[in-house]
């Protein structure tokens, strides 16, 4: 059976999480854990090595990268993002919003403005969940430093079939070439949001300017605006 793109991305994301947790392992151990060949593991590792996330030597694999620090948003940055949203919300009735450290704060603001929101983040706040304008994509759950977000084919198809006036996309890297994020799974979701929404606005992590994270969302272009 051929692996789908989504299943490959999910496996690679799980490999990253395993490496982050265990810090050091072997190719044979990874192949056993994920029930794939050592050749498949070696192929997956090449991308991680190029990004400086792991080193591989004589079958040993050592984790170097830590993804959590790249995704931080300070209180001052959060307030700036929220304060800059108004022009982008003009005539917006349906918004799609990805995972970020401030997603629940943004949700509260959007829902208070009677804007319907589809989000990839797993929301647990009872007040937000009680609002009928909130919808979660569903899909495979991926852990983050602060919670979980949905990914995979179910999440992507939900975004594609749900019309949105505006996509609000969190990114951890932005320079003259690329808009980037920290995980493969998130980059797939973000690209789908860009393609599906009428307009897109990007808000950045604290140290994202002139920084390039591990995985590309899209090339820098006029197709989206950066709001902070």
Image (tube, helix red, strand yellow):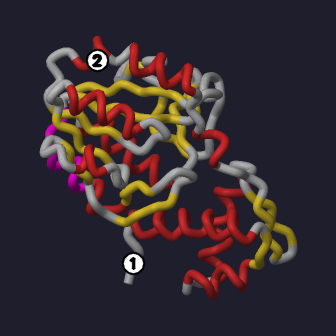
Q: Nearer the viewer, residue 212 or 95?
A: 95
How many marks can you see? Answer: 2
Image point (65%, 28%), residue name: 207
Q: Are the residues at dot 1 and dot 2 in contact (C-beta closer than 8 Å)? A: no
x, y (%) of residue 160?
Answer: 21, 48
Image point (61%, 23%), residue name: 209
Q: Is 115 placed above or below 100 here?
A: above
Q: Nearer the viewer, residue 126 or 17?
A: 126
Give the structural element (helix, strand or loop) at label 1: loop
Judged by depth in the image, the label closer to the viewer, 1 or 2, is 2
Q: Which mark is residue 168?
A: none
x, y (%) of residue 103?
Answer: 39, 39
x, y (%) of residue 82?
Answer: 40, 21
Image point (72%, 84%), residue name: 28
Give the structural element (helix, strand or loop) at label 2: helix
How dense is the environment of label 2, judged by Cα within 10 Å: few (below 14), some, or many (20 and up)? some
Q: Which residue is mark 2?
A: 88
Q: Which residue is mark 1?
A: 2
Please identify the residue farthest to the front as the structure is shown: 127
x, y (%) of residue 134?
Answer: 20, 44
Determine whether, in the image, residue 177 is placed left or right of residue 56: left
Q: Quadrant of the N terminus?
A: bottom left
Q: CA distance from mark 1 to mark 2?
A: 42 Å
> Residue 193's image quarter?
top left
In magenta segment, residue 64: no
- Which of the two discs, 1 and 2, labels the residue nearer the N terminus? 1
> Residue 152's image quarter?
bottom left
In magenta segment, residue 161: yes
Determine whether, in the image, residue 196 is placed left or right of residue 53: left
How dense is the environment of label 1, judged by Cα within 10 Å: few (below 14), some, or many (20 and up)? few
Residues drawn in magenta:
157-164
């Amino acid at each position: 059976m051929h692996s789908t793109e989504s299943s490959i991305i999910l496996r690679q994301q799980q490999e990253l999480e395993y490496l982050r947790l265990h810090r050091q392992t072997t190719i044979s151990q990874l192949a056993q854990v994920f029930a794939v060949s050592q050749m498949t593991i070696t192929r997956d590792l090449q991308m991680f090595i190029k990004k400086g996330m792991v080193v591989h030597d004589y079958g040993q694999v050592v984790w170097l990268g830590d993804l959590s620090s790249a995704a931080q948003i300070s209180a001052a940055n959060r307030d700036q993002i929220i304060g800059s949203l108004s022009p982008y919300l003009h005539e917006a009735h349906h918004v799609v919003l990805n995972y970020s450290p401030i997603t629940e704060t943004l949700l509260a603001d959007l829902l208070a403005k009677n804007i319907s929101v589809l989000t990839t983040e797993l929301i647990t706040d009872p007040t937000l969940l009680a609002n009928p304008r909130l919808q979660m994509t569903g899909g495979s759950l991926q852990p983050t430093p602060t919670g979980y977000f949905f990914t995979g084919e179910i999440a992507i198809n939900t975004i594609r079939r749900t019309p949105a006036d505006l996509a609000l996309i969190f990114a951890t890297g932005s320079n003259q070439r690329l808009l980037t994020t920290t995980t493969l799974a998130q980059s797939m979701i973000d690209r789908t949001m860009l393609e599906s929404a009428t307009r897109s606005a990007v808000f950045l992590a604290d140290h994202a300017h002139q920084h390039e994270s591990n995985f590309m969302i899209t090339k820098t272009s006029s197709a989206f605006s950066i709001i902070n």
